[in-house]
Image (cartoon, grey):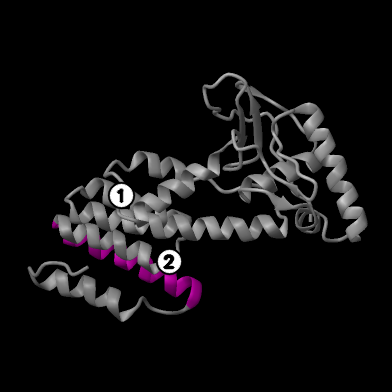
Amino acid sequence: MTGRGQRGETVQAPSDSNSLSVRLLGGFGLVRDRDVVEVANGEARVVAFLGLNSGAQRRSYVAGQLWPEVSEQRARANLRNAVWKVHAALPGLLDPGPDTIGLASSVHVDIAEVRVAADMVLRGDGSSNPLPYAQLFSEELLAGWDDDWVLFERERLKQLCLHALEDFSDHCADAGAFAAAIDSALLAVKLEPLRESAHRAVSRAHLLEGNVVQARRQYETYSHLLWDELGIAPSEAYSKLVSFNCTTASPVAS
């Protein structure tokens, strides 16, 4: 399967002089000194793969992942050719070794911001401002690419973001930042519409804010969607959460 880079996109690069920046979110992009650099598909795939895998990677592993349909000898030759072309067009982007290859440590990769932000949230260090998280977690990794290694990393990143958004929502709701809590939970719903824990986070935030009707409406929206798609009902835990708080004034349990 072949990845398709999206050319000519605006990619925000660091402000340092002679900076190099790789964009993987929303589509592939490569920037040098704020100018978009066009590279062929083969070279783009090498840069994208290295951007997803931090640190030096064994050349045999990179070649096998990027060209699984050809012999090992041919795959390694393809990698050597792509690396040579990238180095000729953008010296300083790659950090080659005798048996390894990676991006130079000075290269900025946007996915690193997502991973750092998600780690902060999951460790409880996130702020109550939802905007940066919404911006970071709402773009698909390498949109339009269908390589097996891209599909795997895309799902891996989505799961990381979903857990971070739900944790962030709960944190904000407990702190009384209800707008941020609901916004983050709804973004999780958008990323994965059939995910119950995301819908439950929306209802929980509404209940803590005292909006029982909206909490119930979210539950019913999910209930109808789940029945239409899979023919099943929401979990007993979600049902009890909403029905219990719709009939009593008891506090919401985490």
Residue 90 in picture, x, y percent from top left: 74, 28
Are circles 2 and 1 on residues that touch, CB within 8 Å? Answer: no
Q: Is 236 situated above or below 229?
A: below
User: SS class of the residue under badge 1?
Assistant: loop
- Mark nearest the camera among 2 and 1 is 1
Tell me the residue at 79%/56% (across/down). 1
Circle number at residue 125: 1
Q: Residue at image x 87%, y 54%?
A: 75
Instruction: Identify which residue, 52 or 251, lies in the foreground.
Output: 52
- Between the C-alphas of marks 2 and 1, the distance is 25 Å
Residue 76 sits inside the magenta stretch: no
The amino acid at mark 2 is Arg
Q: Element at badge 2?
A: loop
Residue 142 visible from this viewpoint: no
Q: Amino acid at mark 1?
A: Asp
Q: Is residue 233 above or below residue 7?
A: below
Q: On the rendered image, what quadrant is the C terminus found in?
A: bottom left
* Residue lying furthest top: 17
Left or right position of 184 against 77: left
Which residue is nearer to you in this view: 143 or 78?
78
Relative to 185, 90 lies left or right: right
Of the pair 152 and 240, the residue shown nearer to us: 152
Horizontal side of 72 relative to 111 (left or right) equals right
Q: Which residue is mark 2?
A: 195
Q: Which residues are magenta?
A: 210-230
Splitting the image into 4 quarters, where does residue 29 fall? top right
Residue 82 horizontal/vertical position (percent): 83, 40
Instruction: Give the residue furthest to the left.
Output: 249
